[in-house]
Image (tube, rainbow, N blue to C red):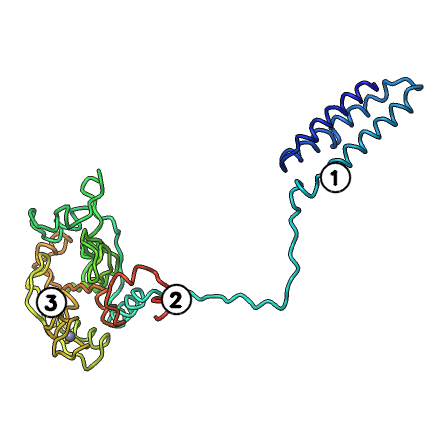
Amino acid sequence: MINEIKKLREEIDFHLKEIASADLFEQFKLSYLVKKGKIQELFDKMKTVTPDEKPLVGKELNLLRKFAEEEINKLKDKFAKPETHVPELDLTLPGRKSYHGSYHPVLQILDEMVEIFVLMGFSVAEGPDIEDGFHNFDALNFAADHPARDMQDTFFIKNGNNLLLRTHTSPVQIRVMKSQKPPIRCIMPGRVYRNEAINARSLAEFHQIEGLYIDKNVSFAQLKGTLMEFSRKMYGENSKFRFRPSYFPFTEPSAELDISCFLCGGKGCRICKHQGWLEIAGCGMVHPNVLHSGEINHEEYSGFAFGFGIERVALLRTGIEDIRLFYENDKRVLEQF
Ligand SMILES: [Zn+2]
């Protein structure tokens, strides 16, 4: 037994010299100083020792344990893992400022537009961002060789079997026509995607708000009246507007709505490209083929549709000249709105 104690002492001496890290420090304690450690193992063997030997063996064992504890204590400062402690509360420190989030300027404009249309009796509908070729193109009377169907203009989903990121909110028109019966008065806000080079005036993703009205005997005059009413509420009573003939596959006749440039008052500047006018919406009477795609009888019903680009409106309203600033999430920009 005395020999075993000596042997263990040699082992302990050896390991003590080896301690060079917090891990080895912990390992030492686990090997020798816990309840199932090697020193305790020898204590447990005491019952096999003859009564004569017991006092001596007991004394030696106690010395060994004391030695191991003292030695490991000397290394504590160097290797023991620091105990976590809760810092005392310092009431003199300044408080932490809490920051309020706010609505993004683009969404503020979107909300404002939706609110005006809702007051005019329109309801709100939404559709999926990932569309199929039928809803995005075919149903909207796009010719089979229309350039918008090209990979260079549209993001198609890889191996997506004709799935794509919608290039406009117009496919929601088809979904609304199929799910509702006329009269339909609906606006459809949402995010749209185009494979375009990103610069100060255009982005690869942006927002549109689409409008659709279908009933018996809907006229172009009603379309004009609706858009003028909306635009006066949105841009102010004194703004000047004009309708300009245009072309879209899904409307016939088609027009674009311009507002007089409020930076130069119509005299011409960099923003309006010296035209004095800024384009704010496309619109027209819903093409009979589109009504047909939406399963609506085009002999009984007619309708008008329109679409606004939200970022365009947000640029005009905020005076920001670079559209990319809306998506960089720089707090110095966002905090101003
Ligand atoms: Zn101008």
Mark 3 Cα within 10 Å, few/some/many (few <14, many 20+)? some
Amino acid type, callout 3: Glu
Q: Position of residue 112 (x, y in %)?
A: 29, 70
**In this picture, is 134 found above or below 298?**
above
SS under mark 3? strand
Choose mark 3 or mark 2, whichever is in front. Answer: 2
Q: Tag 2 or tag 3, which sits nearer the N-term?
A: 2
Judge from the rendering whether residue 314 lies leftward or rightward of residue 275; answer left or right: right
* Front in this rendered view, residue 210 or 208: 208
As measured in the structure, the alpha-carbon distance from the residue carrying label 2 to the one carrying label 1 is 57 Å
Give the class, few, some or many, for how many residues have Cα within 10 Å of label 1's Cα (few <14, many ≥20): few
- Say which quadrant the N terminus sits in: top right
Question: Residue 73: which disc?
Answer: 1
Q: Helix or strand or loop: what does disc 2 sit on?
A: loop
Q: x, y (%) of residue 117?
A: 24, 69
- Is 78 placed left or right of 282 in the picture? right
Which SS class for mark 1?
A: helix
CB contact under 8 Å: marks 3 and 1: no
Determine which quarter of the picture holds residue 262. bottom left
Task: Please state the horizontal and vertical placement of residue 24, each as a whole percent of the image.
Answer: 64, 33
Identify the residue position indicated by label 2 in the image.
102
Q: Earlier in the sequence, mark 3 or mark 1?
A: 1
Foreground: disc 2 or disc 1: 1
**Farthest residue toward the bottom?**
238
* Residue at position x 9%, y 50% in the image: 147
